[in-house]
Amino acid sequence: MKKLSLAIPKGSLQSSTIDMMQKAGFRVEVRSRSYYPAVDDKSLDLRLIRPQDMSRFVEKGAIDAGLTGADWVAENESSVQEVAELVYAKQQLVPVRWVVAVHEESPINSVEDLQGKNISTELVNVTRRFLKSRGVDASVEFSHGATETKVPELVDAIVELTETGSSLRANNLRIVDTVMESTTVMIASETAWEDEWKREKMENLAMLFQGVMVAQNKVGLKMNVGEESLEAVLDVLPALRNPTVNHLAHEAGYAVETVLDEKVARELIPQLKRAGAGDIIEYGLNKAVI
């Protein structure tokens, strides 16, 4: 049987990635202390790899494909095929940022103020390229962790990943500038991408994963509407495209169905009821392939 080896990120993105796969229709089980998750698809071989390392292994062809951050692909300068961009992070469905941060009382107010300063980060290569592009010569050293605690006693500034900024604020840091934005990307080795079966498998996975992203924070609404109220109900409804309208049996009216943002649904349901809709049902979505 043909198989595709797919790496999922070990660490902060692990839980959200497995949740995405579950919603895409795959049952994934990570056993204690195992780096080889089980999945109910015999054509998939899963393994856990740190996102910092993943693009290097994919580039070498040790793994066919993987889910990692675009930041680590850039850091490793890996030559890989980007199959899809998937905008999700540890906490929210938004890109994350690598930012230059300093202590809130630091005199540093711009990137140019970093001239001759000491900077600590995990994203060393990207940071050096960023500083060079701004004409700044500074010392950039690798951080093995707890980067936020190193300012101002040990270094002048840090370049750190942030999703909400809460950790930086908790450590009395303020953001000076953004080095790069990053999203989760599905990447493939050039060899795997050239294999027709593996390429189709990866494209199918990407389609399902992107469908999960589209469906986040959206719900479906279905309702029954009498002929005399149809126009009024349709005037109320937004949709990803257009509401679906079908005749009910025995000329009893219409069944109307649509997809919309969850926070919009709570405002619309009373309006739909007043416009003449009945038997209104709201349901969650796992994926929406547009």
Image (cartoon, helix red, strand yellow):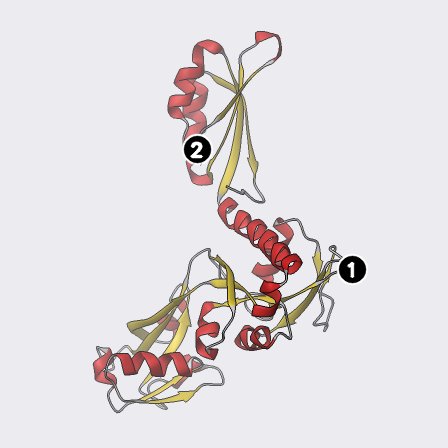
Q: Residue 153 lies in what quarter of the image?
A: bottom left
Q: Quadrant of residue 1?
A: bottom right
Under circle 1, the secondary element is: loop
**Residue type, mark 2 in image:** Ala
Which of the 4 quarters of the picture holds residue 174? Answer: bottom left
Front in this rendered view, residue 13 or 180: 180
Given this view, does label 2 or label 1 mark the residue nearer the observer?
1
Q: Residue at x 57, y 8 (%)?
A: 251
Q: Position of residue 128 (x, y in %)?
A: 35, 83
Which amino acid is tagged 1? Answer: Met
Residue tagged by mark 1? 1
Q: Earlier in the sequence, mark 2 or mark 1?
A: 1
Q: Can you tell which mark lies on residue 110?
A: none
- Please tell me whether residue 156 is drawn above or below residue 247 in the rendered image: below
Image coordinates for residue 240, horizontal then vertical, percent: 44, 36
- Which residue is labeled 2 in the image? 239
Q: Is residue 165 left or right of residue 190?
A: left
Residue 129 percent across, percent down from the top left: 34, 81
Could you tell me how far apart the alpha carbons at marks 2 and 1 are, in whole angstroms?
A: 42 Å
Is label 2 in a helix, a strand or a loop? loop
